[in-house]
Image (cartoon, rainbow, N blue to C red):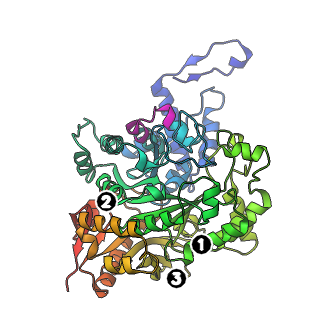
C-alpha cells in the first residue's frame, strides 16, 4: 500500500497518513482520464499529469503496468474511450512484438554437450555456451529451468508491459537440443504447451500427453504459433527430424559458425562443412525454416575469409539460410579461448576492423534473409577480450546510413521498422523472387509498398526436387549418409515426395490477438490469404499434387479455414487439376 504524506511532512512535524487502496486507485485513474483528455496522449504527457496531480502528496508513482491495468479497467467500464496511440505509448520495448508475434525464449537445463569448441564458455550451472548473466539465462536459472514457469512468467511480463502475447513464438535455447534425452525433450515441450493452455484457463486442465496438450492449443486463447530449437549440423539426422515434427517444431537454428574447414579444425568444432551441407538438405526436404549462426573473427579466420563466407552462404545453393545470426567471436573467462587470448595465441576481431567487416557483410545479405541478431547478449563486464559495444547493431546501421549504404534484410524492411509508412494508407503489391537451394527452387513472395521500402507480409514457398533428382545432383551424389537419411524421411513422411512446401507465412506489424482487428495495423488485412492463394497457383502450375504447410500447432485452425487438413504432421491441401 502506498503512503500519502501531508505537505509539512518533510519538516518532520507529522507522520505519513496511509491512503486506502480505493483512494489510490481513484487518484491514478484521474491521471489517466486527464491525460486522455488531450488530443495526443503520450507517455511524457502521462508523466507530466502524474507529477501535477501527485505533487505534495508523497505518493509513489505507479509503474507502467499499474497504468496499463487501470486504463483497461476504465475502458471496460466505458468511462473512457480506447486510444491506440496511448496504448502504444504505454508499451515497454515495443520492438519485442512489432514483428507480429511474441517471442518467448526458454532454456533447457544444464546437460553435457557433445562439442568441445574452444570459444564456448562452460559454466557448470548453465547449458553449454550460455552464462548466467545473460537475460534469458538468468531468468531460466531463477526458475530452476522449469519450462512451464519460464513460459508463464515471460508471457505475463510482456502483458504487464503492455504487449499482446497471445501468439507465442516459442524459442528453445540450451545448446545442442538433439543431444538431450528424448524423454526430457518431450516432457519439456509438453510443459511449454501446458503453460500456454493454462494462461487462458480459469480452471487448469490436466493433459495426459504431449499430443493432448498440442490438440488443446489449436484452439487455446494463447497459442504457440511457431517452435524453434537449436542444434549442431552433425546432430541433424532423419530420426531427430522425425521427432522434431512430433514436437511441433517449425524452425531450426543451426550452429554453422564458419564455412572454412581449417577454422573448424582449429576451434575444435568436431565436424566439417559437409555436415552443414547435409543438414541443410535434410531440413529443406522436410520444409523447416533455417537460421544459421555465424561467428566472424574466429581463431584461424580473417575479415577476408568471413566476408567470403557471407558471399558463399547466399551464392551457393547448398546453403541460402532464411535467417542468420551474426555473433562476432568474443572471449569469455570460462572458455578455453580465454587462455589463447591471454597468452597471445588469439587476437579477437574488434573496433573499426570488426565494424568494417560487419558493414560489408550486411550489404551482401539478400532480401529473403532476416538478420535476427547481431552480437550475443553477453553483458559487457563478462567479456574478457573482444567487442564490448552492446549496441553494435545500431552503431553499424547509423554508419551505413551516413555512407548511403543499406541493409536489405527482412528485419530492416519490416513495416514496423520503416519510418514514414502508414499501413492504412499505402499502395501495396506482390513481388516474387526465385533462387535455387538444396537442388530445389525457393520462391520468396512478399507484399510490399510499390517503392519496396517496407514489407507487410511474406511467404516462403519451396518447390522441392524428387528424391532421385536430389540424390543425383552433383553436390549430393557422393554423400551416402545423405541418401540413407533421405530415404528414411520419405518412408516416414510419404507426402514430402509429392508436395510443394509453404515453409513460412508471416504478416508484420505490432502483435494483435487472434480475433482483434485494427484498421491502422498491417496484420489481419488479408495479406496471408492473398499470399497463400498465390502459392497454390504457382504450385499447381508447376505440376505438384499437393501443397503442404509446416504449420505451428497454434495456427492449424487458420489453415483449416483455407481448406487444409492435418496429414503426417503437416497442413495439406490437394491441388485440383
Of residue 18 and residue 197, the one placed in the foreground of this image is: 197
The answer to whether one can see residue 556 in this image is yes
Q: In this view, does 277 lie above or below 345?
A: below
Find the magenta span and give its range.
140-151
Q: Which mark is residue 555?
A: 2
> Residue at horizontal 45%, vertical 44%?
159
Closer to viewer: mark 2 or mark 1: 1
- Magenta residues, dominant SS class: helix
User: Is residue 148 in the magenta section?
Assistant: yes
Q: In which quarter of the image is residue 530?
A: bottom left
Q: How crowded is mark 3: few (under 14 residues within 10 Å), some or many (20 or more)?
A: few
> Separation of disc 2 and disc 3 at Cα?
29 Å
Marks 2,3: beta carbons within 8 A: no
Closer to viewer: mark 2 or mark 3: 2
Dot 2 lies on which element?
A: helix
Q: Badge 1 is on which residue?
A: 365
Dot 3 lies on which element?
A: loop
The tag earlier along the polypeptide, 2 or 3, is: 3
Of residue 372 and residue 343, the one placed in the foreground of this image is: 343
The tag earlier along the polypeptide, 1 or 3, is: 1
Dot 1 lies on which element?
A: loop
Of residue 183 and residue 340, the one placed in the foreground of this image is: 340
Residue 115: % across, % down: 53, 48
Residue 420: % across, % down: 59, 70
Q: Badge 3 is on which residue?
A: 450
The tag earlier along the polypeptide, 2 or 1, is: 1
> Residue at horizontal 47%, vertical 49%?
176
Q: Which mark is residue 390?
A: none
Would residue 72 be found to the left or right of residue 302 on screen? left
Q: Quadrant of residue 373?
A: bottom right
Amino acid at each position: 500500500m502506498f503512503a500519502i504524506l501531508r505537505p509539512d511532512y518533510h519538516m518532520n512535524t507529522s507522520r505519513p497518513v496511509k491512503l486506502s487502496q480505493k483512494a489510490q486507485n481513484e487518484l491514478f485513474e484521474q491521471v489517466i482520464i486527464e491525460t486522455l483528455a488531450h488530443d495526443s496522449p503520450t507517455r511524457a504527457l502521462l508523466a507530466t499529469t502524474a507529477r501535477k496531480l501527485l505533487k505534495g502528496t508523497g505518493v509513489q508513482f505507479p509503474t507502467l503496468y499499474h497504468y496499463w491495468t487501470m486504463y483497461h479497467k476504465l475502458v471496460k467500464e466505458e468511462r473512457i474511450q480506447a486510444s491506440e496511440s496511448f496504448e502504444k505509448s504505454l508499451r515497454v520495448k515495443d520492438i519485442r512484438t512489432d514483428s507480429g508475434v511474441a517471442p518467448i525464449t526458454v532454456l533447457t537445463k544444464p546437460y553435457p554437450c557433445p562439442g568441445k569448441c574452444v570459444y564456448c564458455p562452460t559454466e557448470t550451472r548453465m547449458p553449454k555456451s550460455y552464462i548466467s548473466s545473460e537475460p534469458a539465462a538468468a531468468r531460466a536459472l531463477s526458475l530452476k529451468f522449469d519450462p512451464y514457469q519460464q513460459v508463464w512468467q515471460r508471457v505475463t511480463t510482456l502483458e504487464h508491459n503492455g504487449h499482446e502475447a497471445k501468439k507465442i513464438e516459442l524459442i528453445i535455447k540450451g545448446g545442442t537440443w538433439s543431444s538431450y534425452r528424448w524423454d526430457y525433450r518431450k516432457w519439456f515441450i509438453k510443459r511449454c504447451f501446458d503453460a500456454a493452455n493454462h494462461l487462458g484457463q480459469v480452471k487448469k486442465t490436466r493433459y495426459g500427453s504431449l499430443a493432448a496438450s498440442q490438440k488443446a492449443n489449436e484452439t487455446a486463447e494463447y497459442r504457440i504459433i511457431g517452435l524453434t530449437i537449436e542444434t549442431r549440423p552433425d546432430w541433424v539426422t532423419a530420426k531427430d527430424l522425425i521427432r522434431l515434427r512430433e514436437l511441433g517444431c517449425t524452425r531450426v537454428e543451426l550452429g554453422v559458425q564458419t564455412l572454412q574447414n581449417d577454422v573448424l579444425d582449429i576451434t575444435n568444432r568436431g565436424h566439417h562443412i559437409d555436415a552443414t551441407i547435409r543438414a541443410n538438405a535434410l531440413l529443406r526436404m522436410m520444409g523447416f525454416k533455417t537460421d544459421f549462426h555465424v561467428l566472424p573473427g574466429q581463431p584461424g579466420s580473417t575479415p577476408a575469409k568471413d566476408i567470403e563466407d557471407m558471399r558463399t552462404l547466399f551464392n551457393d545453393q547448398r546453403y541460402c539460410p532464411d535467417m542468420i545470426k551474426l555473433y562476432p567471436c568474443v572471449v569469455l573467462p570460462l572458455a578455453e579461448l580465454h587462455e589463447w587470448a591471454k597468452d597471445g595465441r588469439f587476437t579477437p576481431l574488434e573496433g573499426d576492423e570488426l565494424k568494417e567487416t560487419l558493414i560489408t557483410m550486411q550489404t551482401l545479405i539478400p532480401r529473403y534473409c532476416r538478420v535476427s541478431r547481431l552480437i550475443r547478449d553477453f553483458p559487457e563486464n563478462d567479456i574478457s577480450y573482444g567487442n564490448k559495444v552492446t549496441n553494435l547493431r545500431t552503431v553499424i546501421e547509423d554508419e551505413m546510413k551516413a555512407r548511403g549504404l543499406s541493409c536489405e534484410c527482412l528485419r530492416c524492411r519490416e513495416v514496423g521498422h520503416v519510418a514514414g509508412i502508414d499501413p492504412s494508407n499505402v499502395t501495396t503489391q506482390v513481388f516474387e523472387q526465385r533462387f535455387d537451394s538444396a537442388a530445389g527452387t525457393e520462391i520468396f513472395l512478399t507484399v510490399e509498398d510499390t517503392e519496396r521500402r517496407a514489407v507487410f507480409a511474406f511467404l516462403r514457398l519451396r518447390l522441392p526436387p524428387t528424391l532421385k533428382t536430389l540424390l543425383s545432383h552433383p553436390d549430393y551424389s557422393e554423400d551416402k549418409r545423405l541418401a540413407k537419411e533421405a530415404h528414411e524421411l520419405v518412408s516416414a513422411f510419404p507426402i514430402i515426395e509429392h508436395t510443394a512446401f509453404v515453409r513460412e507465412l508471416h504478416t508484420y506489424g505490432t502483435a494483435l490477438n487472434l480475433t482483434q482487428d485494427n484498421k491502422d495495423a498491417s496484420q489481419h488485412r488479408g495479406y496471408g490469404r492473398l499470399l497463400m492463394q498465390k502459392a497454390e497457383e504457382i504450385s499447381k502450375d508447376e505440376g505438384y499434387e499437393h501443397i503442404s504447410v509446416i504449420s505451428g500447432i497454434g495456427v492449424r485452425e487458420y489453415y483449416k479455414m483455407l481448406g487444409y487438413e492435418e496429414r503426417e504432421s503437416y497442413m495439406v491441401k490437394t491441388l485440383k487439376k
